[in-house]
Amino acid sequence: MSHSKTYETPYSAHEKRLIWSTTRSVLETDQFKHKRHGKKSKSNWNYFKRILNFLLWGTRITGLYKIGYANVQNIQINKHELYFDNLPTNFQGFKILHLSDLHIDATPELLHSIMHVVDQAEFDLAVLTGDYRQDSSGAFTQVIEPMKQLSNLLQKEFTPLAVLGNHDTYLMTEYEKELQMRFLINETVELERDGQFITISGSDDPFSYYTDAVLQSFTNKPGFKIALVHTSELADVASENHYQLYLCGHTHGGQVCLPGGLGEITIFELKKK
C-alpha cells in the first residue's frame, strides 16, 4: 500500500498558500527580479531578449531556423541510475520521471512530441520543476489544457508533484485539481510504501521570486529526502539539511552548447565535491 501525506508546519496549508499567493502576486508586478542576494532589474532580461530576436532573424535568413524548430520536437529521455545508502528498502528500484522547462505553448507540435515520449516511459512518480509556459508574463490559461492532457499520462502510483518556475504565475496553482497534480509551494510531503517513507520538498522559484519562505521548504528531519526547485540556487541549503537528491531545471540541460556538451554560458556556480 502506498500514499502521501503533508509534513506538519506552524500554519495550515490553506493559510500558507494564502500568504504565499498574496506575496507572489505583488512580486509578479514588480520591475525587479527578487533573488536570494538582492534585487536585479528585469530590464537586463529585456536587452537579452532583443539580442535573441536579432539572432532569431539571423537563423531565419540562413535556414538554421527550420533545423532548430525540428530539434525542439526531438524530445528524449535521459536515464540515470542512482544509488543511496539510506533509501528505504520498499523504495528500491523507485522510478522518477523528471520533466522541466516544457514551455508547452512554444510550438503547436510540442505537446504531441512530449506525450509520445512520456507514454512510453516507465515510472512510479512524475515531478515537474517549472516553466510551463513560453512567456514570463501575460496570458497563461493557454497552457492549462495541454498540461491536463499531459497530466493524464503522469498518473501512476503517486500523484504528480510540481513546483513553479520564473516563467510561471501563482494563478496556475488555482488549477491544481483540474491538472491532477500537487503543487509544492515551500512545502514538504511524505510518500509511503508499506510503512516506509521518503520525503519530498518543493520551493517557489528562487530565480525571480525569492523570499525567505523558500528556506522553510527544507526540513532537517532524518530520512531519505528529495528537493524539487526550479533552479540550482538552493542546492547548498538542501545539502545543509541533508537532502540526498536535488532535482531542478532552468538551464535546459545544456540545450545550447559547444560540441561535446561544453556549455557556452555558466549561469550558476556550484561547488563540486
Image (cartoon, helix red, strand yellow):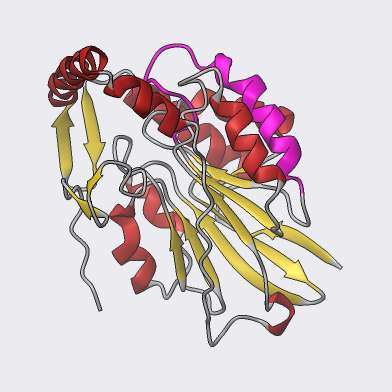
Residue 152 lies in magenta, yes or no?
yes
Q: Nearer the viewer, residue 68 or 206?
A: 68
Asked whether residue 126 is in view, the answer is: yes
Q: Residue at x 67, y 56 (%)?
A: 125
In the figure, is residue 195 to the left or right of 30? right
Asked whether residue 7 is in view, the answer is: no
Instruction: Report the magenta residues as a range.
Output: 131-155
- For the image, the number of numbered tags is 0
In the figure, is residue 30 to the left or right of 111? left
Choose top left, top right, bottom left or bottom right for residue 109. top right
Rendered-image quadrant of the C terminus: bottom left
Choose top left, top right, bottom left or bottom right for residue 223. bottom right
Question: Is residue 39 depicted above or below 242 in this figure?
Answer: above
Residue 111 lies in magenta, yes or no?
no
Q: Residue 254, how many percent across, how many down?
A: 30, 48
Q: Residue furthest bottom?
A: 85
Q: Residue 11, how many percent across, how many down?
A: 57, 49
Q: Residue at x 52, y 27 (%)?
A: 104
Q: Residue at x 66, y 81 (%)?
A: 88
Question: Is residue 1 depicted above or below 147 in this figure?
Answer: below
Question: Is residue 155 depicted above or below 188 in this figure?
Answer: above
Q: Residue 72, how many percent across, how many down?
A: 43, 31
Question: Is residue 148 depicted above or below 199 in this figure?
Answer: above
Q: Residue 174, how many percent across, how many down?
A: 62, 26
Choose top left, top right, bottom left or bottom right for residue 2. bottom right
In the figure, is residue 93 to the left or right of 76? right
Rendered-image quadrant of the N terminus: bottom right
In the figure, is residue 20 to the left or right of 239? right
Q: Nearer the viewer, residue 84 or 112?
A: 112
